[in-house]
Structure formats: structure tokens, C-alpha cells
Amino acid sequence: MTLLRDDELAAAFDQASRSYDTLVAANPGYHGQLRRSARRLGLPDGGAGLRVLDLGCGTGASTAALAAALPEAEITAVDASDGMLERAARKPWRAGVTFVRAPAEGLAEAGVRGPFDAVFAAYLFRNVTDPDAVLRAVRDVLAPRGRLAVHEYILSGRGAHRAVWTGVCRGLVLPVATLLGDGDLYRDLWRSVVEFDTADGFAARVRAAGFQDVRTLPLPGWQTGITHTLVARRPGPTGEGGR
């Protein structure tokens, strides 16, 4: 069985959008971890005067994390799923937060253009057909020295961490998702983590895409060794972009 990709994946997320926030609420620390990763962008002055792209915003959990960490930033949140984006846009947002339907591979075609001072991508890269192409697209919309933070289920490579991930999915996530009618999508998401890069492998992929200052940072709690923040910069003269 191949992983869902592109239009098929967007359609599956459309269907799952009605119950997505319910499943998220069952994950201890989910929102706190996103806020921690958003803060790891390290942007100054609450993001005053800065543009930030939330790539793959889903129902807006990552957008909320950015809005909390960067209350003064202009945030553009994009997603390929109409259903997820509709749920996100219904929520109350401060001025300066906008939502656009766009696949990660088609930002320019949807009118999403840089330069951005930072890009935040949560739970995105293991779900795209060509992560290297998306990384190049991210690099292209970033200002020189602009910052990237990736918040992702990326396993450490240790067998114990893979076993915890599989145990949580089979024991909790999949039974609940199946009851809600979304079992196929969440089986796909479990496999997408197991079959994607390790944390070190993804860091190497990001470096190969032309980023520098690449660091992989752990997250606390039960997701240690399962979820990581990766931070990096687009090269450029010191003092430009991302401040």
C-alpha cells in the first residue's frame, strides 16, 4: 500500500477536518510543543515588522502557536486542504493573520510570494511527494538570512522511540480515528513517520537544499526522540532578513 499524496491526501484531510481538533486534544502537550518550536525561530521584538509563512497550517494549531510567540508579526498561513483551511479560518484571529489555499509546491501560483523573514512548517515534509523540491521552494521565498523552523514527527533512529510511536498509534490514535471514520488517513500518517527520514537524515536533507546553521532540537515529554524541531537559515549577508 502506497502512502497518500497530493490530491488524495488533501481529500483525506478534507474529510478528517471535522474531527482533527478532537484527536489533537487527546495528545498531551501538542499545543505547547508547537509554541516551543515557534519560539525557536528566535525572532526579535515579538516579530514586529516581520513576515512569517506558516506552511501547512491545517486547522490553525501551528498558526495559533506562531501568533502567540510572535504577536506583532504578519502571518500568512497556507494549506492544500479546503476542509482544514475552512476550519482554521473560522477561528478568531488577530489582525495580521491571513489564510490562503495553496499546496506547498505551488506557492507562487496561489499568489504567496516572499520575501518572508521566517517559515514555520509543522507536520508537513513527510507528507509531500518531493520534500527536496519543497525545501527549495522554502529557500526561495525566504529573505537572505531568513529562518526556517520545522516541527515534525521525525524519529531519532533508535528502536525504542520507533516502538513508542507505533504503540501510541496502534493503542490510541488508530482506534479513536477508526471510530471517527478516519482510520485510513491515520494509518497512512503512522506509516509516513516510520518510512520518513530519521532526525539526522532530515538535517542532512536540509543542508543539501542549501540551508546553513542547521540544528535538530529535541522536544520534552513522551515525544522525546519522536518529535523534533529543526531550525536553519537561508544563507546571506549578516544583518539581512530575519534580523
Image (cartoon, helix red, strand yellow):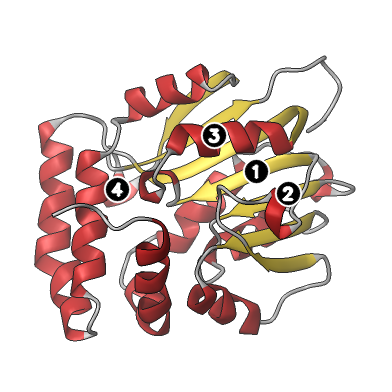
> Quick one: SS at disc 2?
strand
Q: Is residue 74 left or right of residue 59?
A: right
Query: Which mark lies nearer to you, 4 or 3?
Result: 3
Upstream in sequence: badge 3 or badge 2: 2
Q: What's the distance in space between the residues labelled 1 and 2, CA to CA?
A: 6 Å
Q: What's the distance in space between the residues labelled 4 and 3, CA to CA?
A: 24 Å
Dot 3 crowding, Cα within 10 Å, few <14, some 14–19, many 20+? many
Dot 2 crowding, Cα within 10 Å, few <14, some 14–19, many 20+? many
Q: What's the distance in space between the residues labelled 4 and 2, CA to CA?
A: 26 Å
Query: Which mark lies nearer to you, 3 or 2?
Result: 3
* Quadrant showing the N terminus: bottom left
Q: Amino acid at mark 2?
A: Val
Which residue is identified by label 4? 223
Front residue of this view, candidates 192 and 146: 192
Which residue is identified by label 3? 135
Q: What's the distance in space between the residues labelled 1 and 3, CA to CA?
A: 11 Å
